[in-house]
Image (cartoon, rainbow, N blue to C red):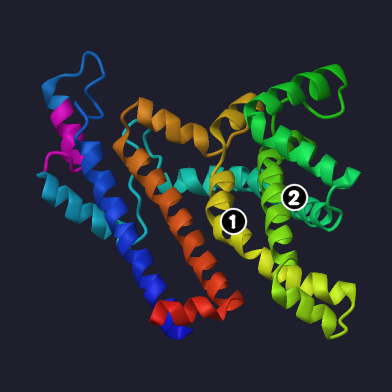
Amino acid sequence: MLRYTLRRFGYMLITMWVIITLTFFLMHMLPGDPFSDIEKMTPEVKAKLLAKYGLDKSLPEQYMIYLGNIVKGDLGSSYKTSNRDVNDIIEQHFPTSARIGGQAIVFGLFVGLTLGIVAALRQNSWVDYSAILVAIIGVSIPNFVIATLLSYFVGVKLGWFPPAGWGKFSHTVMPSFALSLGMLAYFARMMRTSMLDVIGQDYMRTAKSKGLNDFQIVVKHMIRNAILPIITILGPMIVGIITGTIIIEQIFIIPGLGKYYIHSIYLNDYAVTLGLTIFYSALLIFAIFVVDILYGVIDPRIRVAGRK
């Protein structure tokens, strides 16, 4: 298991280096520079700004300096906002996106898996058909449409929750639900399909012949084997939600991390765009790494195949 973990960790570091390198050079291939859109800037002032941020150096020099700063945990400073580090932006605004995303994940995962399991165990019943209907609705309707409807009808018309804003728990309910519905539907559909596939396997008949009760069969054999495909996509899906859905944040006026990412691209703010891209990528790659380890723990055959 240790060799398997170290190998996966090495792949993670190599992938991270490739992403950093590609993002760095692609950003610097864009036309202009962070200060080219500022009107009435004299060449002298522009030269001082380029020197201040090290943009007057050659591209290889900038790359090596940037790599060194990343190793030290420094993602740089914004070129557009004075005295604003990328680390500070992440520290202040990522918890907001993470809170919304975390609540969406807990609700979507719990309800989605429960629906999928119950639907498979009660195949062709009204429970099964209801779960399929929820899955179709969740997959078919984009979350920003659901968010808009919730904000207008539940927030404005009914007044059950604040239609927008941030500060109280009530502000998080509708954004979290809007984010969770797609995940809920996807997990319900996938878990149902996986459960139905497991139910028909030979080892299920063996478990029943051993005299195990229904609870033991469902928990130890059905769910454990059926949940493997869920774990495969769980990591990237969690990161995608936690890092913040930009449109959802805009609809509910949530001060999350997503809007800073978009603004940095519009403003050609290299440091913020690079820093947030690396931050998002690191989360995604780490999530995939954790999923690989969990996969190996749950199914030892994967570790053996990896060694071969």
Return the x and y of residue 266 as percentages of the image width and height: 37, 25
Determine crowd level at label 2: few under 14, some 14-19, many 20+ residues with C-alpha closer than 10 A: many
Return the x and y of residue 134 as percentages of the image width and height: 77, 38
The tally of labels here is 2
Label 2: which residue?
A: 112
Residue at 69% of width from left, 33% of height from top? 166
Q: Is residue 209 left or right of residue 253?
A: right
Q: Is residue 159 above or below residue 77?
A: above
Q: SS of the residue at dot 2?
A: helix
Q: Quadrant of residue 139?
A: top right
Return the x and y of residue 124 as percentages of the image width and height: 85, 47
Return the x and y of residue 18 as percentages of the image width and height: 28, 55
Query: Quick one: 75 or 207, which is closer to the camera?
Result: 207
Sooner in the amino-acid sequence: mark 2 or mark 1 = 2
Q: Are marks 2 and 1 in contact (CB under 8 Å)?
A: no
Label 1: which residue?
A: 234
Determine crowd level at label 1: few under 14, some 14-19, many 20+ residues with C-alpha closer than 10 A: some
Q: Is residue 37 left or right of residue 81?
A: left
Q: Is residue 226 above or below residue 5?
A: above
Query: Quick one: 142 or 167, which is closer to the camera?
Result: 142
Q: Is residue 112 above or below residue 6?
A: above
Query: Quick one: 133 or 101, which is closer to the camera?
Result: 133
Three-letter amino acid code at the position of disc 1 = Leu
Q: Is residue 2 above or below residue 189?
A: below
- Quadrant of image for the C terminus: bottom left
Res. 103 in view: no
Q: Which residues are magenta?
A: 46-57
Residue 10 falls inside the magenta stretch: no
Res. 38 in view: yes
Three-letter amino acid code at the position of disc 2 = Gly
Residue 53 falls inside the magenta stretch: yes
Q: CA distance from mark 2 to mark 1?
A: 12 Å
